[in-house]
């Protein structure tokens, strides 16, 4: 399993995947807003989305787990 983590403090503004979706490494899985910029957060490996821990509109800190890929 691999965790997609928050790269910087910010707020989740979009979740581009659902549990059970197949994703390719480097595919956008979450979009965050940080420092007045929208930044994609990508899958760290190819696999299947096992769990989504993030919620749109919530703020997270560096290192918080957003999505789990198996």
Image (spheres, rainbow, N blue to C red):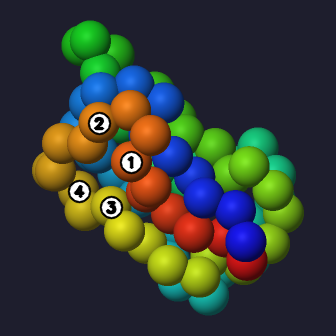
- Residue at point 51% right, 46% down? 5
Q: Which residue lies furthest to the front in this view?
A: 63
Residue 34 left/right relative to 25: left
The residue where tag 2 is placed is 61
Q: Which of marks 4 and 2 is nearer the N terminus?
A: 4
- Mark 4 to mark 2 CA distance (whole Å): 14 Å
The residue where tag 4 is placed is 56
**Badge 4 element:** loop
Res 33 seen here: no
**Badge 2 element:** loop
In this view, 51 is above or below 26: below
Q: Check disc 4: other Cα within 10 Å, few if <14, some if 14-19, many if 20+.
A: few
Q: Which of marks 1 and 4 is nearer the N terminus?
A: 4
Q: Residue furthest top?
A: 35
Please tell me whether mark 4 or mark 2 is closer to you in this view.
Answer: 2
Mark 3–mark 4 contact, CB under 8 Å? yes
Please tell me whether mark 1 or mark 4 is closer to you in this view.
Answer: 1
Residue 62, position as x, y percentages in the image: 38, 32
Residue 64 left/right relative to 34: right
Please tell me whether mark 3 or mark 4 is closer to you in this view.
Answer: 3
Residue 2, position as x, y percentages in the image: 70, 62
- Mark 3 to mark 1 CA distance (whole Å): 9 Å
Q: Check disc 2: other Cα within 10 Å, few if <14, some if 14-19, many if 20+.
A: few
Quarter assignment of residue 56: bottom left
Residue 16, position as x, y percentages in the image: 49, 59
The residue where tag 3 is placed is 54
Q: Check disc 3: other Cα within 10 Å, few if <14, some if 14-19, many if 20+.
A: many
The residue where tag 1 is placed is 64
- Residue at point 64% right, 44% down? 42
Mark 1–mark 2 contact, CB under 8 Å? yes
- Mark 3 to mark 2 CA distance (whole Å): 11 Å
**Badge 3 element:** loop
């Amino acid at each position: 399993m691999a965790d997609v983590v928050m790269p910087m403090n910010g707020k989740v503004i979009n979740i581009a995947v659902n549990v059970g979706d197949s994703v390719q490494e480097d595919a956008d899985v979450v979009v965050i807003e940080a420092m007045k910029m929208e930044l994609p957060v990508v899958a760290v490996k190819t696999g299947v989305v096992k769990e989504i821990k993030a919620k749109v509109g919530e703020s997270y800190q560096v290192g918080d787990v957003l999505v789990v890929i198996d």
